[in-house]
Image (cartoon, rainbow, N blue to C red):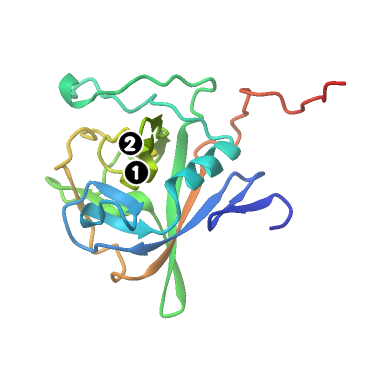
Amino acid sequence: MGPNEFEVGGIRFNGQTREIRLPAVVNIKEAPIEYLLVHETGKVHESVLRTGVKASDLQVALLLCHYEAGTEGLAHPEAPKELTPIKPLALKNPGANRLKISLEWKVDGTQKTAPLSDWMRDINTYKPAPDLETWIFSGSYVDEDGFAADRDGSFVSAYLDRNAMINSPARRNWDDSAWISNPAAIPAEGTEVTVIISPANPHLKDTSSPTTTKSKP
């Protein structure tokens, strides 16, 4: 699309800044939620946002932007073990699975922005999670039925879902009844929104592969 600018399946990303942008629509303004973003054929009854882009295309964009899938940071000591069936996925570069997610939308021609975490709140305190400055790219997986995130349509999950590509590291992330939407922060249902993914640590160097590859004679 231009210098360092690429597009796959309606998802735009910049190879230098590692910023990823994808279109979405406000799906639910006020409800108990398990997800922040799902595919339009996924679990839309419990997600704030929905999108028409493919989950596998987003996973490709994340990997091309040198985010590294890993489960580091998802498990909490107080979580019931039977409720957190996490298969460890180690990182080659510590912190490479951490990312920020923000939103852009317009109201009467005026552009608004907010972190994605502002659109969810704890069902007990009615406040946004205080420990959700970053999200975790845990990565979905391929099984005998194909790519799990494509099958389920799960992009960003508020509770621990290994089928989803991105998960919340907040405490009580193992509890699927812990979260509700924050209607005071969310625009009207049907509002077009751009979801923006950016690195939590833009200075983190990727050492998982060489920067140059020489051709064999």
- Mark 2, Cα crowd under 10 Å, few <14 / some 14-19 / many 20+, is many
Amino acid carrying mark 2 in the image: Asn
Q: Pinpoint residue 133: horizontal percent, then vertical percent.
A: 38, 41
Residue pictured at 27% horizontal, 48% vertical:
35
Q: Which mark is residue 163?
A: 2
- The numbered mark, 1 or 2, whose residue comes first in the sequence reads 1
Q: Pinpoint residue 116: horizontal percent, then vertical percent.
A: 36, 52
Vertical position of residue 187 compared to residue 138: above or below? below
Residue at the disc numbered 1: 151
Q: Is residue 88 left or right of residue 83?
A: right
Q: Quadrant of the N terminus?
A: bottom right
Vertical position of residue 40 compared to residue 161: above or below? below
Along the viewing direction, whichever of 89 and 8 lies nearer the viewer? 8
Q: Is residue 65 among what the camera can see? A: no
Vertical position of residue 143 compared to residue 114: above or below? above
Question: How far is disc 1 from disc 2 in space, using C-alphas?
Answer: 9 Å
Q: Is residue 193 among what the camera can see? A: yes
